[in-house]
Amino acid sequence: MKLVSAYFLRQNLHMDSTHSFTKYQNDLAGIARVIAHPARIAILQYLSAVHDASFDYILDDLELEPEALGVHLKELENSGFIRKIKQDEDFHYFIDTLSWNKCKEILMGFFKEVPKNNNRCD
């Protein structure tokens, strides 16, 4: 499984390399950065519903510009959210289940850390 590395985060989030963050914090920030774009969320939802799809099918159904779709698919692939395989003449994209489950675990852990009834500033 390939989750976002600290080096990748520093390059893309402009983090100062002198700051020390935990692996968990880096992983969580990487996940948040990748899914922060609505097109990527739409792609993930689409692939979750159809299991796998070629570039052309995704392009037709989501009505994105080809260049934009290519960029978003590459970002999702580089971060480990999706994978691609060659079938016939096309590449088919699908969600990497192991990575997906790890991301889900990290996100759920983060939301469990937030206090439940802390609506006051005393």
Image (tube, grey):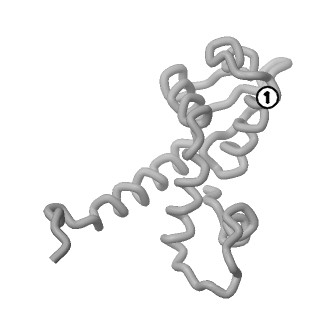
Pick the front one: 65 or 59: 65
* Residue 49 place in picture, x, y as percent: 49, 22
Within 10 Å of the Cα at label 1, are there few (<14), some (14-19), or many (20+) other Cα atoms? few
Q: Quadrant of the N terminus?
A: bottom right
What residue does disc 1 label? 86
- On the picture, is 79 further left or further right than 70? left
Indicate the secondary structure of the residue bearing disc 1.
strand
Write down the quadrant of residue 69 in the picture. Answer: top right
Q: Quadrant of the C terminus?
A: bottom left
User: What residue is at 71 percent from the left and 36 percent from the top?
Assistant: 73
Pick the front one: 55 or 34: 34
Write down the quadrant of residue 94 in the picture. Answer: top right
Task: Judge whether 43 appears above or below 116 on screen.
Answer: above
In this view, which residue lies farthest toward the top? 60
Task: Judge whether 16 appears above or below 77 on screen.
Answer: below
- On the picture, is 12 further left or further right than 1? right
* Residue 40 place in picture, x, y as percent: 60, 36
In this view, which residue lies farthest toward the right? 89
* Residue 121 place in picture, x, y as percent: 19, 72
User: What residue is at 17 percent from the left and 63 percent from the top?
Assistant: 119
Task: Judge whether 94 appears above or below 75 on screen.
Answer: above
Task: Judge whether 11 appears above or below 89 on screen.
Answer: below
User: What residue is at 63 percent from the left and 40 percent from the top?
Assistant: 82
The kind of residue on which mark 1 rests is Lys
- On the picture, is 77 further left or further right than 96? right
Pick the front one: 35 or 77: 35
- On the picture, is 115 further left or further right than 91? left
Q: How many marks?
A: 1
